[in-house]
Amino acid sequence: MWLTKPVYEALPYVYLIAGAVLLTLSMYLDFGIWPTTCLVLGIACLVYGLVLWLRRRVYRGRRSGADEELL
């Protein structure tokens, strides 16, 4: 799947915001399985957003270091 650059760059932040919203919703919902579902999905979104952000940071750090060695 191909994404445009602005969408691709925003994905970690979208996941982090979605995770925070879902965790907040889990505190205020009080019917059925929705609180548990929001809690699990919120934690999953936060973890995935952090992993995505950290992996990009490490990859870009390695690439910039390799580019500097060539100069």
Image: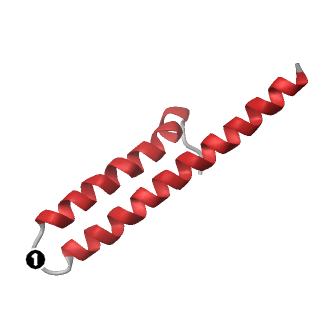
SS state under label 1: loop
Binning the other alpha carbons within 10 Å of mark 1 as few (below 14), some (14 to 19) or many (20 upward) gives few
Q: Position of residue 19 (x, y in %)?
A: 34, 56
Foreground pick, 20 / 6: 20
Residue at position x 55%, y 42% from top? 3
Q: Position of residue 54 (x, y in %)?
A: 57, 48
Q: Is residue 11 above or below residue 23?
A: above
Return the residue found at the far top.
Answer: 71
User: Which of the image's four quarters has the C terminus?
Assistant: top right
Number of marks in the image?
Answer: 1
In the image: residue 26, left or right of residue 52 = left
Return the residue found at the far right.
Answer: 70
Residue at position x 46%, y 39% from top? 10
The quadrant in which residue 4 appears is: top right
> Which residue was labeled with disc 1?
31
Residue at position x 59%, y 45% from top? 2
Return the residue found at the far bottom.
Answer: 32
The quadrant in which residue 5 appears is: top right
In the image: residue 43, left or right of residue 59 = left
The quadrant in which residue 59 appears is: top right
Q: Is residue 28 above or below residue 67?
A: below
Q: Position of residue 40 (x, y in %)?
A: 34, 71
Q: Is residue 70 above or below residue 63?
A: above
Residue at position x 52%, y 37% from top? 9
Task: Check the image and tell me how it is coloured.
Answer: secondary structure
In the image: residue 54, left or right of residue 27 = right
Q: Position of residue 20 (x, y in %)?
A: 29, 53
Q: Mark 1 is on which residue type?
A: Phe
